[in-house]
Amino acid sequence: MARYRSFAEHLAPDVGPKRILALDGGGLRGVLTLGMLREIETLLRARHGDDPDFRLCDYFDLIAGTSTGAIIAAALSLGMSVDEVHGHYMRLGQLVFKRSLLRWGALRAKFDGDKVRESLVGVYGDRRLDSQDFRTGLLVVTKRLDTGSAWPITNNPDSKYFKSGAQATTIPNGEYPLWQVVRASTAAPYFFDPETIGIGRAAAGLKALKGDFVDGGVSPSNNPALQALMTATMEGYRLSWPAGENKLLVVSVGTGKSNAEVGHAGIVQGTAAIHAVLSLKALMEDCADQVETVMQWLSRSPTARRIDREIDKAQPPLGGQAMCSYLRYNVLLQSDWCAENLGETLGAKALKNLEVMDEPDNIPELDRIGRLAGKKLVKAGHFEAAFDTPPS
Protein backbone atom coordinates (compact mmCIF):
# COMPACT_ATOMS: atom_id res chain seq x y z
CA MET A 1 0.00 0.00 0.00
CA ALA A 2 1.38 3.41 -0.95
CA ARG A 3 2.40 5.71 1.87
CA TYR A 4 2.16 9.47 1.56
CA ARG A 5 3.01 12.21 4.04
CA SER A 6 1.27 12.12 7.38
CA PHE A 7 -0.57 15.17 8.67
CA ALA A 8 2.44 16.08 10.83
CA GLU A 9 4.81 15.66 7.89
CA HIS A 10 2.63 17.88 5.70
CA LEU A 11 3.04 20.71 8.21
CA ALA A 12 6.65 20.10 9.27
CA PRO A 13 9.06 22.71 7.82
CA ASP A 14 11.87 20.16 7.39
CA VAL A 15 9.83 17.82 5.16
CA GLY A 16 9.82 19.21 1.65
CA PRO A 17 9.35 20.40 -0.94
CA LYS A 18 6.07 22.05 0.02
CA ARG A 19 2.95 22.43 -2.12
CA ILE A 20 -0.01 24.78 -1.53
CA LEU A 21 -3.42 24.67 -3.20
CA ALA A 22 -5.46 27.90 -3.04
CA LEU A 23 -9.12 28.07 -4.07
CA ASP A 24 -10.99 31.31 -4.80
CA GLY A 25 -14.43 32.36 -3.66
CA GLY A 26 -17.23 32.88 -6.17
CA GLY A 27 -20.53 31.28 -5.15
CA LEU A 28 -21.82 28.57 -7.45
CA ARG A 29 -19.02 29.35 -9.88
CA GLY A 30 -17.01 27.00 -7.68
CA VAL A 31 -18.24 24.39 -10.16
CA LEU A 32 -15.61 25.79 -12.53
CA THR A 33 -12.98 25.20 -9.85
CA LEU A 34 -14.01 21.57 -9.49
CA GLY A 35 -13.67 21.01 -13.23
CA MET A 36 -10.08 22.22 -13.20
CA LEU A 37 -9.29 20.36 -9.95
CA ARG A 38 -10.48 17.11 -11.51
CA GLU A 39 -7.81 17.41 -14.20
CA ILE A 40 -5.13 18.34 -11.63
CA GLU A 41 -6.04 15.29 -9.55
CA THR A 42 -5.98 13.01 -12.61
CA LEU A 43 -2.60 14.34 -13.72
CA LEU A 44 -1.03 14.04 -10.28
CA ARG A 45 -2.46 10.57 -9.72
CA ALA A 46 -0.76 9.46 -12.94
CA ARG A 47 2.49 11.02 -11.69
CA HIS A 48 2.21 8.95 -8.52
CA GLY A 49 1.83 5.48 -9.97
CA ASP A 50 -1.88 5.65 -10.91
CA ASP A 51 -2.68 4.83 -7.30
CA PRO A 52 -6.51 4.66 -7.12
CA ASP A 53 -6.35 5.83 -3.49
CA PHE A 54 -4.39 8.98 -4.36
CA ARG A 55 -6.06 12.22 -3.32
CA LEU A 56 -5.07 15.88 -3.62
CA CYS A 57 -4.47 15.89 0.14
CA ASP A 58 -1.61 13.44 -0.47
CA TYR A 59 0.20 15.97 -2.66
CA PHE A 60 -0.66 19.35 -1.17
CA ASP A 61 0.66 20.25 2.27
CA LEU A 62 -1.79 23.14 2.75
CA ILE A 63 -5.15 23.63 1.07
CA ALA A 64 -6.55 27.15 1.40
CA GLY A 65 -10.00 28.40 0.52
CA THR A 66 -12.23 31.43 0.74
CA SER A 67 -16.03 31.23 0.65
CA THR A 68 -17.04 28.56 -1.88
CA GLY A 69 -13.34 27.69 -2.08
CA ALA A 70 -13.40 26.99 1.66
CA ILE A 71 -16.19 24.43 1.17
CA ILE A 72 -14.05 22.58 -1.36
CA ALA A 73 -10.77 23.03 0.55
CA ALA A 74 -12.17 21.59 3.79
CA ALA A 75 -13.54 18.53 2.02
CA LEU A 76 -10.28 17.92 0.17
CA SER A 77 -8.26 18.29 3.37
CA LEU A 78 -10.29 15.44 4.88
CA GLY A 79 -9.26 13.11 2.06
CA MET A 80 -12.21 13.33 -0.31
CA SER A 81 -11.65 12.90 -4.03
CA VAL A 82 -12.71 15.64 -6.42
CA ASP A 83 -15.62 13.48 -7.59
CA GLU A 84 -16.79 13.04 -4.00
CA VAL A 85 -16.61 16.79 -3.40
CA HIS A 86 -18.42 17.39 -6.68
CA GLY A 87 -21.33 15.23 -5.51
CA HIS A 88 -21.64 17.10 -2.23
CA TYR A 89 -21.30 20.44 -4.00
CA MET A 90 -24.08 19.70 -6.49
CA ARG A 91 -26.50 18.84 -3.69
CA LEU A 92 -25.46 21.85 -1.63
CA GLY A 93 -25.86 24.25 -4.55
CA GLN A 94 -29.39 23.13 -5.34
CA LEU A 95 -30.48 23.26 -1.69
CA VAL A 96 -28.79 26.44 -0.48
CA PHE A 97 -29.54 28.67 -3.47
CA LYS A 98 -33.22 27.77 -3.74
CA ARG A 99 -35.17 31.00 -3.96
CA SER A 100 -38.05 31.81 -1.64
CA LEU A 101 -40.72 34.50 -1.97
CA LEU A 102 -40.60 34.82 1.82
CA ARG A 103 -37.09 36.29 1.67
CA TRP A 104 -37.71 39.14 -0.70
CA GLY A 105 -36.93 42.63 0.52
CA ALA A 106 -33.98 44.78 1.53
CA LEU A 107 -33.90 43.84 5.23
CA ARG A 108 -33.35 40.09 4.93
CA ALA A 109 -30.52 38.05 3.52
CA LYS A 110 -31.36 36.65 0.11
CA PHE A 111 -30.90 33.01 1.15
CA ASP A 112 -31.44 30.94 4.30
CA GLY A 113 -28.22 30.40 6.25
CA ASP A 114 -29.77 27.44 8.11
CA LYS A 115 -29.72 25.51 4.86
CA VAL A 116 -25.99 26.17 4.58
CA ARG A 117 -25.50 24.83 8.10
CA GLU A 118 -27.57 21.74 7.32
CA SER A 119 -25.58 21.03 4.19
CA LEU A 120 -22.17 21.60 5.76
CA VAL A 121 -22.94 19.45 8.81
CA GLY A 122 -24.00 16.76 6.37
CA VAL A 123 -20.54 16.87 4.78
CA TYR A 124 -18.25 17.51 7.77
CA GLY A 125 -20.27 16.10 10.67
CA ASP A 126 -19.29 17.32 14.13
CA ARG A 127 -15.58 17.66 13.38
CA ARG A 128 -13.64 20.50 14.94
CA LEU A 129 -10.43 22.06 13.67
CA ASP A 130 -8.51 19.86 16.11
CA SER A 131 -10.08 16.64 14.79
CA GLN A 132 -7.57 13.88 14.20
CA ASP A 133 -8.73 12.80 10.75
CA PHE A 134 -7.49 15.76 8.73
CA ARG A 135 -5.16 14.44 6.07
CA THR A 136 -3.36 17.72 5.39
CA GLY A 137 -3.20 21.38 6.36
CA LEU A 138 -6.28 23.59 5.96
CA LEU A 139 -6.58 27.38 5.81
CA VAL A 140 -9.99 29.09 5.75
CA VAL A 141 -10.25 32.85 5.27
CA THR A 142 -13.15 34.67 6.92
CA LYS A 143 -13.70 38.20 8.24
CA ARG A 144 -14.87 39.31 11.66
CA LEU A 145 -17.54 41.90 10.94
CA ASP A 146 -17.71 43.54 14.37
CA THR A 147 -13.98 44.40 14.34
CA GLY A 148 -13.38 44.61 10.59
CA SER A 149 -10.40 42.25 10.78
CA ALA A 150 -9.64 39.39 8.41
CA TRP A 151 -9.26 36.02 10.15
CA PRO A 152 -7.15 33.37 8.39
CA ILE A 153 -7.92 30.25 10.46
CA THR A 154 -5.87 27.05 10.15
CA ASN A 155 -5.79 23.55 11.60
CA ASN A 156 -2.10 24.00 12.47
CA PRO A 157 -1.75 22.76 16.07
CA ASP A 158 1.23 25.07 16.61
CA SER A 159 -0.57 28.27 15.59
CA LYS A 160 -0.85 30.93 18.28
CA TYR A 161 -4.53 30.61 19.11
CA PHE A 162 -5.08 26.93 18.35
CA LYS A 163 -4.83 25.77 21.96
CA SER A 164 -5.89 27.46 25.18
CA GLY A 165 -3.54 28.40 28.00
CA ALA A 166 -3.98 27.16 31.54
CA GLN A 167 -6.05 30.18 32.61
CA ALA A 168 -7.20 31.53 29.26
CA THR A 169 -10.83 32.49 28.71
CA THR A 170 -10.41 32.64 24.93
CA ILE A 171 -11.96 29.71 23.13
CA PRO A 172 -9.09 28.22 21.09
CA ASN A 173 -9.41 27.91 17.34
CA GLY A 174 -8.96 24.16 17.61
CA GLU A 175 -12.37 23.91 19.30
CA TYR A 176 -14.22 25.70 16.50
CA PRO A 177 -16.58 23.38 14.61
CA LEU A 178 -15.34 22.90 11.05
CA TRP A 179 -18.79 23.47 9.55
CA GLN A 180 -19.08 26.79 11.41
CA VAL A 181 -15.71 28.10 10.22
CA VAL A 182 -16.63 27.24 6.63
CA ARG A 183 -20.12 28.72 7.07
CA ALA A 184 -18.50 31.95 8.31
CA SER A 185 -16.28 32.09 5.24
CA THR A 186 -19.32 31.71 2.96
CA ALA A 187 -21.52 34.33 4.66
CA ALA A 188 -21.51 36.81 1.78
CA PRO A 189 -23.23 40.09 2.71
CA TYR A 190 -26.67 40.47 1.12
CA PHE A 191 -26.75 36.76 0.24
CA PHE A 192 -26.43 35.28 3.77
CA ASP A 193 -26.59 36.49 7.34
CA PRO A 194 -23.31 36.62 9.32
CA GLU A 195 -22.22 33.57 11.31
CA THR A 196 -21.83 34.10 15.06
CA ILE A 197 -19.01 32.13 16.67
CA GLY A 198 -18.25 31.95 20.38
CA ILE A 199 -14.68 33.17 20.85
CA GLY A 200 -14.48 33.77 24.61
CA ARG A 201 -15.91 32.07 27.72
CA ALA A 202 -17.62 33.84 30.58
CA ALA A 203 -15.23 34.21 33.52
CA ALA A 204 -14.51 36.54 36.47
CA GLY A 205 -17.55 38.67 35.85
CA LEU A 206 -16.93 38.91 32.10
CA LYS A 207 -19.64 37.89 29.68
CA ALA A 208 -19.05 35.26 27.04
CA LEU A 209 -17.66 36.88 23.90
CA LYS A 210 -19.01 36.23 20.44
CA GLY A 211 -17.86 37.44 17.04
CA ASP A 212 -19.92 37.97 13.91
CA PHE A 213 -18.17 36.63 10.81
CA VAL A 214 -18.79 37.18 7.11
CA ASP A 215 -17.43 35.95 3.82
CA GLY A 216 -13.65 36.07 3.50
CA GLY A 217 -14.23 37.45 0.02
CA VAL A 218 -14.88 40.91 1.46
CA SER A 219 -11.29 40.92 2.70
CA PRO A 220 -8.40 41.25 0.21
CA SER A 221 -8.29 37.43 0.07
CA ASN A 222 -11.17 36.25 -2.08
CA ASN A 223 -8.21 34.77 -3.93
CA PRO A 224 -6.39 33.29 -0.91
CA ALA A 225 -3.10 32.49 -2.68
CA LEU A 226 -1.14 35.39 -1.18
CA GLN A 227 -2.56 34.80 2.30
CA ALA A 228 -1.61 31.13 1.99
CA LEU A 229 1.94 32.08 1.00
CA MET A 230 2.19 34.41 3.99
CA THR A 231 0.72 31.77 6.31
CA ALA A 232 3.27 29.23 5.15
CA THR A 233 6.37 31.42 5.36
CA MET A 234 5.85 34.17 7.99
CA GLU A 235 7.11 33.23 11.45
CA GLY A 236 3.99 34.57 13.18
CA TYR A 237 1.82 31.85 11.64
CA ARG A 238 4.21 29.19 12.99
CA LEU A 239 4.63 27.00 9.94
CA SER A 240 7.90 28.65 8.84
CA TRP A 241 8.28 26.80 5.57
CA PRO A 242 11.36 27.65 3.50
CA ALA A 243 10.85 29.75 0.37
CA GLY A 244 12.37 29.23 -3.07
CA GLU A 245 11.19 28.29 -6.54
CA ASN A 246 12.24 24.66 -6.04
CA LYS A 247 11.10 24.50 -2.42
CA LEU A 248 7.57 25.87 -2.54
CA LEU A 249 4.82 25.49 -5.15
CA VAL A 250 1.56 27.46 -5.06
CA VAL A 251 -1.29 26.26 -7.28
CA SER A 252 -4.17 28.74 -7.45
CA VAL A 253 -7.56 27.90 -9.00
CA GLY A 254 -10.22 30.50 -9.74
CA THR A 255 -13.99 30.61 -10.19
CA GLY A 256 -14.02 32.63 -13.40
CA LYS A 257 -13.01 36.23 -13.99
CA SER A 258 -15.81 38.59 -14.99
CA ASN A 259 -15.57 40.75 -18.08
CA ALA A 260 -15.36 44.34 -16.85
CA GLU A 261 -16.36 45.67 -20.26
CA VAL A 262 -19.75 43.94 -20.40
CA GLY A 263 -23.08 44.79 -18.86
CA HIS A 264 -22.57 48.01 -16.92
CA ALA A 265 -24.63 50.31 -19.15
CA GLY A 266 -27.59 51.75 -17.27
CA ILE A 267 -26.03 51.27 -13.84
CA VAL A 268 -27.08 54.78 -12.82
CA GLN A 269 -30.70 53.66 -13.00
CA GLY A 270 -30.14 51.03 -10.33
CA THR A 271 -31.09 51.26 -6.67
CA ALA A 272 -28.71 52.14 -3.88
CA ALA A 273 -28.65 48.48 -2.81
CA ILE A 274 -27.67 47.40 -6.32
CA HIS A 275 -24.95 50.05 -6.40
CA ALA A 276 -23.59 48.73 -3.09
CA VAL A 277 -23.50 45.13 -4.29
CA LEU A 278 -21.87 46.08 -7.61
CA SER A 279 -19.31 48.25 -5.82
CA LEU A 280 -18.43 45.37 -3.51
CA LYS A 281 -18.15 43.03 -6.50
CA ALA A 282 -15.83 45.49 -8.26
CA LEU A 283 -13.67 45.82 -5.16
CA MET A 284 -13.37 42.03 -4.92
CA GLU A 285 -12.29 41.91 -8.57
CA ASP A 286 -9.68 44.61 -7.90
CA CYS A 287 -8.31 42.69 -4.92
CA ALA A 288 -8.19 39.48 -6.94
CA ASP A 289 -6.20 41.19 -9.69
CA GLN A 290 -3.85 42.65 -7.11
CA VAL A 291 -3.27 39.25 -5.52
CA GLU A 292 -2.57 37.69 -8.91
CA THR A 293 -0.17 40.51 -9.78
CA VAL A 294 1.77 40.17 -6.53
CA MET A 295 1.90 36.38 -6.82
CA GLN A 296 3.41 36.70 -10.31
CA TRP A 297 5.86 39.28 -8.96
CA LEU A 298 7.05 36.92 -6.22
CA SER A 299 7.33 33.79 -8.32
CA ARG A 300 8.38 31.97 -11.41
CA SER A 301 5.23 31.02 -13.29
CA PRO A 302 4.71 29.19 -16.61
CA THR A 303 1.00 30.08 -16.51
CA ALA A 304 1.35 33.83 -15.90
CA ARG A 305 -1.22 35.85 -17.86
CA ARG A 306 -1.15 39.47 -18.97
CA ILE A 307 -2.41 41.56 -16.06
CA ASP A 308 -3.13 44.69 -18.10
CA ARG A 309 -1.90 46.53 -21.17
CA GLU A 310 0.67 48.57 -19.29
CA ILE A 311 2.58 46.04 -17.20
CA ASP A 312 1.74 42.94 -19.26
CA LYS A 313 3.03 40.24 -16.87
CA ALA A 314 4.40 41.13 -13.44
CA GLN A 315 8.07 40.42 -14.09
CA PRO A 316 10.90 40.02 -13.15
CA PRO A 317 10.61 38.44 -9.66
CA LEU A 318 10.89 40.92 -6.81
CA GLY A 319 14.55 41.18 -5.79
CA GLY A 320 15.55 38.95 -8.72
CA GLN A 321 14.84 35.70 -6.86
CA ALA A 322 11.50 33.90 -6.86
CA MET A 323 9.94 32.98 -3.50
CA CYS A 324 8.01 30.13 -5.05
CA SER A 325 6.82 28.45 -8.22
CA TYR A 326 3.28 29.51 -9.06
CA LEU A 327 0.52 28.08 -11.23
CA ARG A 328 -2.75 29.93 -11.81
CA TYR A 329 -5.75 28.34 -13.53
CA ASN A 330 -8.88 30.34 -14.22
CA VAL A 331 -11.54 30.95 -16.84
CA LEU A 332 -11.84 34.46 -18.23
CA LEU A 333 -15.50 35.01 -19.02
CA GLN A 334 -14.70 36.84 -22.26
CA SER A 335 -15.68 35.75 -25.77
CA ASP A 336 -12.22 36.18 -27.30
CA TRP A 337 -10.49 34.36 -24.45
CA CYS A 338 -12.89 31.41 -24.56
CA ALA A 339 -12.47 31.10 -28.32
CA GLU A 340 -8.68 31.19 -28.12
CA ASN A 341 -8.15 29.06 -25.02
CA LEU A 342 -11.13 26.72 -24.91
CA GLY A 343 -12.15 26.56 -28.56
CA GLU A 344 -15.66 27.65 -27.54
CA THR A 345 -17.85 30.25 -29.19
CA LEU A 346 -19.73 31.92 -26.34
CA GLY A 347 -21.58 35.18 -26.78
CA ALA A 348 -21.36 38.13 -24.42
CA LYS A 349 -24.90 37.55 -23.11
CA ALA A 350 -24.26 33.88 -22.32
CA LEU A 351 -21.02 34.75 -20.54
CA LYS A 352 -22.70 37.53 -18.59
CA ASN A 353 -25.29 35.04 -17.38
CA LEU A 354 -22.52 32.74 -16.17
CA GLU A 355 -21.07 35.52 -14.02
CA VAL A 356 -24.03 35.21 -11.64
CA MET A 357 -22.89 33.51 -8.43
CA ASP A 358 -26.26 32.26 -7.15
CA GLU A 359 -28.10 30.71 -10.11
CA PRO A 360 -28.46 26.89 -9.88
CA ASP A 361 -29.66 26.74 -13.51
CA ASN A 362 -26.09 27.66 -14.52
CA ILE A 363 -24.58 24.58 -12.89
CA PRO A 364 -24.62 22.23 -15.95
CA GLU A 365 -22.94 24.81 -18.20
CA LEU A 366 -20.42 25.82 -15.53
CA ASP A 367 -19.63 22.14 -15.02
CA ARG A 368 -19.09 21.61 -18.74
CA ILE A 369 -16.85 24.66 -19.10
CA GLY A 370 -14.89 23.80 -15.95
CA ARG A 371 -14.13 20.29 -17.20
CA LEU A 372 -13.16 21.68 -20.60
CA ALA A 373 -10.92 24.30 -18.97
CA GLY A 374 -9.19 21.57 -17.00
CA LYS A 375 -8.43 19.64 -20.18
CA LYS A 376 -7.24 22.70 -22.07
CA LEU A 377 -5.35 24.65 -19.38
CA VAL A 378 -3.77 22.10 -17.03
CA LYS A 379 -0.57 20.66 -18.49
CA ALA A 380 1.71 17.96 -17.13
CA GLY A 381 4.74 20.13 -17.84
CA HIS A 382 3.50 22.75 -15.39
CA PHE A 383 4.08 20.38 -12.45
CA GLU A 384 7.82 19.90 -12.22
CA ALA A 385 9.26 16.60 -11.06
CA ALA A 386 11.09 18.43 -8.26
CA PHE A 387 7.75 18.65 -6.44
CA ASP A 388 6.77 14.99 -6.86
CA THR A 389 6.73 12.77 -3.81
CA PRO A 390 6.81 9.14 -4.93
CA PRO A 391 4.94 6.93 -2.46
CA SER A 392 7.00 4.49 -0.43
Image (cartoon, rainbow, N blue to C red):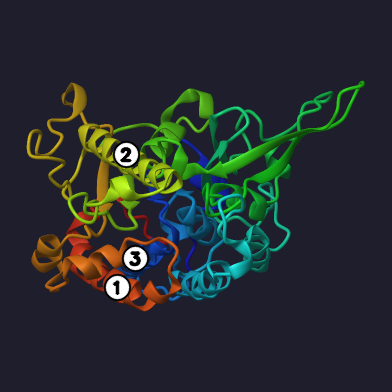
Callout in the foreground (1, 3)? 3
Q: Amino acid at mark 1?
A: Arg
Q: Is residue 128 left or right of residue 384?
A: right
Mark earlier in primary sequence (1, 3): 3
Q: Are marks 1 and 3 in contact (CB under 8 Å)?
A: no
Q: The residue tagged with tag 3: helix, strand or loop?
A: helix
Spot occupied by residue 371 in the image (x, y as percentages of width and height): 29, 73
Which is nearer the eye, 171 or 356? 356
Q: Residue furthest right?
A: 205
Residue behind mark 1: 371
Which is nearer the eye, 114 or 80? 114
| Residue 368 in view (yes/no) | yes
> Residue visible at 45% across and 36% down?
219
Q: Amino acid at mark 3?
A: Leu
Task: Write down the quadrant of residue 208 in the picture.
Answer: top right
Vertical placement of residue 352 versus 310, above or below:
below
The number of discs equals 3
Q: The residue tagged with tag 2: helix, strand or loop?
A: loop
**Which label sits on residue 247?**
2
> Residue visible at 9% across and 62% down?
336
